[in-house]
Amino acid sequence: MINILKSSIIPIFLLSFFGCSDTKSKELASDMAFVDSLMARMTLEEKLGQMTQVDRQFLSDISDISKYGLGSLLSGGGSTPEVNEPKAWADMYDSYQREALKSRLKIPLIYGIDAVHGHNNVVGATIFPHNIGLGATRDPQIVEAVARATALEVAATGIDWDFAPCLAVPDDFRWGRTYEGFSENTELVSELGGAAVRGYQSAEINNPNGVLACAKHFIGDGGVAFGTGINSLIDQGDLQIDEEELRRVHLPPFKKAIDEGVATFMAAYNSWNDLRCHASKYLLTDLLKDELGFEGFVVSDWAAIENIPGDYKSDIIISINAGIDMVMVPGAVRDGKESFQNFLKLFKESVEEGSIPMERVDDAVKRILLIKKQSGLFERPFSDQSLLSNIGSQSHRDIAREAVKKSMVLLKNNNNVLPLPKSGKTIVVAGKGANDIGMQSGGWTISWQGGMGQTTDGTTILDAIKSSVDPGTVVEYSADGKGYTGDLAVVVIGEKPYAEMMGDRTDLKLDKEDRDVIARFTENDVPVVVVLLSGRPMIVTEEVDKWDGFIAAWLPGTEGSGVADVLFGDYKPTGKLSFSWPKSMDQFPIDPNDDHLYKFGYGLTY
Ligand code: GLC
């Protein structure tokens, strides 16, 4: 496959040979010509600016954007406008874009964000199930619909680029990012990851209602060896497998994303046999760009180049030469990370002294500018605020509710305790997760780590249960399970929100608090249905026998109604485990053929 980027102008007939329709090939040729002519006028500083991504919170002044010709901004988790509401986001985006267009060549910036289960930084946005729940739906259509709705909410705020989908294939659930993966099964990750790319980008990346997707993290973050983490137990550690296993287990989802036309990739923090992915020319150039023919651009992860052994200047040289096209610096002096001003200074030195070839810079800038051109950024640089009403819309919440219903996995239903009666019983709802939007949404919600409490608008599981019973039927609520009179209990327990390395654990047993709440019912022979909110299977082997019903609800997001739909049988459960359910902590890394409490693919119905 001729790399379209290596040739300056591809003859039209050749483009049609490669399956481009006449119109498409003419558009591509015209975009290429536009980029070539723009690049011919760019200074070295302007080119390096295009390869620089800064978190907007670290701009010393908005004029930094035009002063340094920054090509990209991002909002890391929680990097929000002062007033966190949709219009403020769109106004903030437009202010940055206006500043970018003051630069000499008026090149629009591209703005990225982690909208990994809805536009999750924005208060009022629809929060969908995290990928672990979408994996249990086994339904590529709903995954595509969720991604499409997410893209529209992101685009409504002007933002162009979503650092999603995560295509990890997690095999050790002690990892805090397990829930960002669809499954432990490569084929399922490929199928659902491809559906997500289609949903985010839709058929044409020049779609004002869509966003650019980002296949992440390349490659192998889900297979890292426990105990090799950087400042953590496992996160960002070392992938200790041979190339055959890397290609068999971790590569297929990325190939599928390329087949679906994914516009960008994000390199992985982890190393592969002791070489950081960000430093691997074999992975980022020989494999990804040359062998797989990826023609978009590769962004680094947050300050990830600083994990490469050596000083910051050598980090820049090694990572750019390996194939990183844009560096997420992100410029956080606060975190003790490098500033973007220092990054640009060292980057320029490295090119001028020949440590980074000009051809490498030109290749990276061409990739970035071509994506900007093809996505319509030059023609439509600003937000379209007529789209704002889509954020948190009822139609999107209905899609989320559908996804929640389909993600529920029924693991136990003794004496047909489920579905619950809508009358005739007094249902007691208990547990720390029963009335908590923050807990049911998990990490990456409003803030990086997420948080407990009413962090955004939505329907708690308690509210959903109250709305489901017949008029006159009493629903009691007792978070700690004390002082109830009811005769049937729904206990909602599990993990408090976390993200990334903050979720690394050595032990996945239930909190004592949770076990105590459940015991307050089982001790009195009150039938109990446990609803588990978690970012991964947890070790319940010693407790589950005392439970009458057990549902894995994962991290469903704002639409708790989908949980109630299954509890009351308005939707018969169809979810199937996309991760094996271990009996004990010594079953990691997961072996699908091991003797688990519940096997991969397990799930009951009514
Ligand atoms: C984070 C994550 C990555 C995310 C990026 C920007 O550390 O590793 O998934 O896209 O930084 O927030």
Image: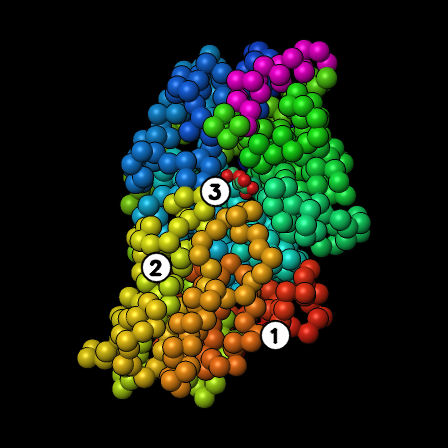
Query: Measured along the vertical axis of the image, is residue 308 above or below residue 86?
Result: above
Name the amino acid, label 3.
Asp
| Residue occupying the point 52% across, 22% down | 339
Q: Quadrant of residue 316?
A: top right
Q: Secondary structure at mark 1?
A: loop
Tell me which label, 1 or 2, sits earlier in the chain. Answer: 2
Total number of numbered labels?
A: 3
Q: Nearer the viewer, residue 339 or 248?
A: 339
Q: Which callout, 3 or 2, points to the residue nearer the camera?
A: 2
Work out how far the residue at label 1 is from the one at label 3, CA to CA, in angstroms: 34 Å
Q: Secondary structure at mark 2?
A: loop
Residue under label 3, please give it: 114
| Residue 540 on image: x %, y % | 54, 72
Q: Which residues are magenta?
A: 337-354
Residue under label 2, please give it: 436
Name the amino acid, label 1.
Leu
Dominant secondary structure of the magenta stretch? helix
Mark 2 sits near ligand 1, with its Cβ under 8 Å away: no
Q: Assess whether residue 174 is covered by the magenta stretch.
A: no
* Residue 278 visible in the current orientation: yes
Residue under label 1, please give it: 597
Q: Quadrant of residue 8?
A: top right
Mark 1 sits near ligand 1, with its Cβ under 8 Å away: no
Query: Measured along the vertical axis of the image, is residue 122 above or below residue 599?
Result: above
Q: Assess whether residue 346 is covered by the magenta stretch.
A: yes
Mark 3 sits near ligand 1, with its Cβ under 8 Å away: yes
Query: Measured along the vertical axis of the image, is residue 171 above or below residue 165?
Result: below
| Residue 281 on image: x %, y % | 74, 33
